[in-house]
Amino acid sequence: MMRTRPLKVALLGCGVVGSEVARIMTTHADDLAARIGAPVELAGVAVRRPSKVREGIPQELITTDATALVKRGDIDVVVEVIGGIEPARTLITTAFEHGASVVSANKALLAQEGQSLYAAAEQHGQDLYYEAAVAGAIPLIRPLRESLAGDKVNRVLGIVNGTTNFILDRMDTSGAGYSEALDEASALGYAEADPTADVEGFDAAAKAAILAGIAFHTRVRLDDVYREGMTEVTAADFASAKRMGCTIKLLAICERAADGGSVTARVHPAMIPLSHPLASVRGAYNAVFVEADAAGQLMFYGPGAGGSPTASAVLGDLVAVCRNRLNDATGPGESAYTQLPVSPMGDVVTRYHISLDVADKPGVLAQVATVFAEHGVSIDTVRQQGKDGEASLVVVTHRAPDAALSGTVEALRQLDTVRGVASIMRVEGE
Amino acid sequence: MMRTRPLKVALLGCGVVGSEVARIMTTHADDLAARIGAPVELAGVAVRRPSKVREGIPQELITTDATALVKRGDIDVVVEVIGGIEPARTLITTAFEHGASVVSANKALLAQEGQSLYAAAEQHGQDLYYEAAVAGAIPLIRPLRESLAGDKVNRVLGIVNGTTNFILDRMDTSGAGYSEALDEASALGYAEADPTADVEGFDAAAKAAILAGIAFHTRVRLDDVYREGMTEVTAADFASAKRMGCTIKLLAICERAADGGSVTARVHPAMIPLSHPLASVRGAYNAVFVEADAAGQLMFYGPGAGGSPTASAVLGDLVAVCRNRLNDATGPGESAYTQLPVSPMGDVVTRYHISLDVADKPGVLAQVATVFAEHGVSIDTVRQQGKDGEASLVVVTHRAPDAALSGTVEALRQLDTVRGVASIMRVEGE
């Protein structure tokens, strides 16, 4: 049975994503109505530049006063695709106060202010959905929040930034250096003019915070996420990775500690075996690998960004929120009941691949091995390569705490025979 | 806020999946209660053999009278993991009539009787969830029904049977023949004593019917699904596939016709390029590739069967249904509003790889090419190989309707110079 009074949607932001949301709402209005059980109507669009021509959006819907729009009182759902912390945060809170539910694609805001936004939604009996905030069109938030609600997730390992995956994929396949691959990504529109948020891992860290909180039913703040960018990954690192049967990806990794009493969340480049499903994720695609007690190993793959894919996720949420509204119900809210603390990076246990430049003389390996042993880091393999009085030493360790590895590296730097630490990279996914 | 009166769950069937559902309900009771907002209690377990020892399940919960259990009137959710059509269908309908919602893992029943079960659920205001019916633990039904509810799905391409994927993977990697690979699958417990349902594609066809109905918001009956098993795939087919840069998978393919006016659903072995994400799905794993207008290409990967993975999917549904119940709401019901008809296999348009045994004399290729041309099937490549008066001809076509290809093959068989049609295989995923 179809309700005839339409549900009213306010759109905040009309850029790449917002314009696509508006377009699909218009062109697929009948499908959306059939799936929701009531028509949905675009009731207003808040923009910064009202004079810009926006095809398909009636001029009378355009406003520059986003606050007045969310305060109208007749809005059922506010779709926020502005990004950034303010004014998005205040607008979302105001929307809740005025009886609207919210669909957001704002990863930075959710990572930083998720807790207070959830609380505001709950206080006012409204929904807060944000599938589009992590990995674009890939259904990820809903599977973690709902499909795996009866399972225990132990690990989330994801390629959640398309720009950096494109760059690393180019370095891997063409042998290009970082700068060259970045230039190519920029030329093709995969990297922004200022790529800092992507290449330094800030974007992935926000997603890691969101994923860890949902996966482990706890609160993980952006500050809790350890972060290393991928600007220092070299062609030599890729050559080393290949020798180990690995490639290099920028990973967001959320883990439950072995004793179950804490969690960790981190973003850094890592070597992963070519046989791992994440290794074959090419170009700007994203993929997230999930390990759960009962489900085993799952992977979700797809485009992680772009106007259309992000709009697909926004519209899926819009349909769900509208259905909830017709049911006089709300979907699952924040689930942070485990209150598991977040451990620092020093507690993370993993394997390491370390390249050292050393003097090419007898006894160096013995010295280096002693330093590892003194710090309780057990060595798996060593490869030595010498030329002209200089040599390189590549050490791959067994699993060890990150703090022990840091101590080892610090001590190695003090050795006269160690000229430099060329690279340190974690080895994951084994 | 936690409700203290527990939600009561009746479990129908206590085999590999059911016992795992019961185990997790007991060992993870606190987590489930926190995620649902109320405790869940196992109120009864219907089994065929009551004397069997079932660790962790109190004897007083065991009953052989499933009908009495679902009629009790105090049951909130019935979990049906018996399988098969009857008595599962009658028990589920009876459960709805007595005020219970249902979580089912029964693909055969959903594929054959989905429409009447949905109608019964709606009539009595109850939920019918069945994530576990397709591809085990892989979240697939929920992403299609909910995450992609604002998008237009055009194609679903899936490896949805673990037994056959294991066999084909072995044939691919070891060069084994079908029988040898089947024996290995049986020895490792991946194939049942009677593997017919798997190797002849019946299991995959049931899943294809369910997926097509959900993806295209229409009704697809099991009889609507074209089905070919994989027992006739040979080592020679794999060799041919390799020469084309392909491998062979048993695929369930659901497509919207190019004009949008109809859909098709089919199960058969097919060659797919090694670069396609489905090509690297190994062993008994499942994966489903989805193409949607806005989202682009998505893939969902994981274990497609087994007690624990299937239990994970059942419990995810159980949590969702319990939450709905506390909200006095129901989740999305059947969505078949498009009423798109299902076209016959003859209308499917795809490419073909055909191996012919022919006489090794001049003019054969011209004869063969003429037959293809007369049927409107355009040839992409031909490879000829001759030895001792016999020769083989491998033809790969451009895209053509299946009916045209069938007509071509029929006519080829009439040629004196064609000794036999060694194999016909579709080429997908390009």
Image (cartoon, coloured by chain):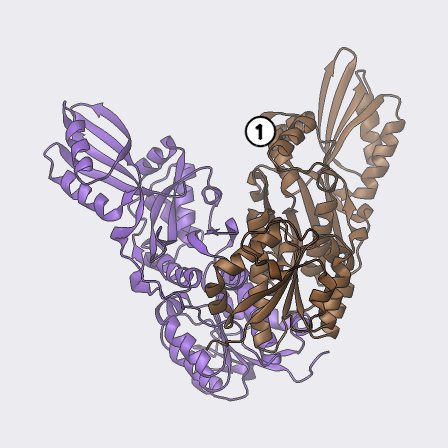
Chain colours: A purple, B brown
At 82% across and 21% down in the image, what residue appears? B364
Q: Position of residue A333 (x, y in %)?
A: 47, 72
Q: Nearer the viewer, residue B95 or B238?
A: B95
In this orientation, does residue B257 appear? no
- Classify residue A191 as left or right of residue A60: left
| Quadrant of the image occupied by residue B6 | bottom right
Q: Position of residue B89 (x, y in %)?
A: 76, 60
Kindly identify which chain the residue marked by label 1 belongs to.
B
Q: Position of residue A245 (x, y in %)?
A: 40, 33
Q: Amino acid at mark 1?
A: Thr
Q: Residue furthest top?
A: B388
Q: Position of residue B165 (x, y in %)?
A: 63, 38
Q: Quadrant of the C terminus of chain A?
A: top left
| Quadrant of the image occupied by residue B417 | top right
Characterize the local packing of mark 1: few (<14), some (14-19) or many (20 or more) Cα atoms within 10 angstroms. few
What is the number of callouts on the image? 1
Above or below residue B17? Residue B419 is above
- Classify residue B417 as left or right of residue B75: right
- Classify residue A87 as left or right of residue B93: left
- Classify residue B349 as left or right of residue A67: right
Q: Nearer the viewer, residue B56 or A62?
A: B56
Q: Quadrant of the N terminus of chain A?
A: bottom right
> Which residue position is annotated with label 1?
B173
Above or below residue A382? Residue B78 is below
SS for callout 1: helix
Above or below residue A10? Residue A238 is above
At 80% across and 47% down in the image, what residue appears? B345
In this orientation, does residue B67 appear? yes
Q: Nearer the viewer, residue B9 or B34?
A: B9
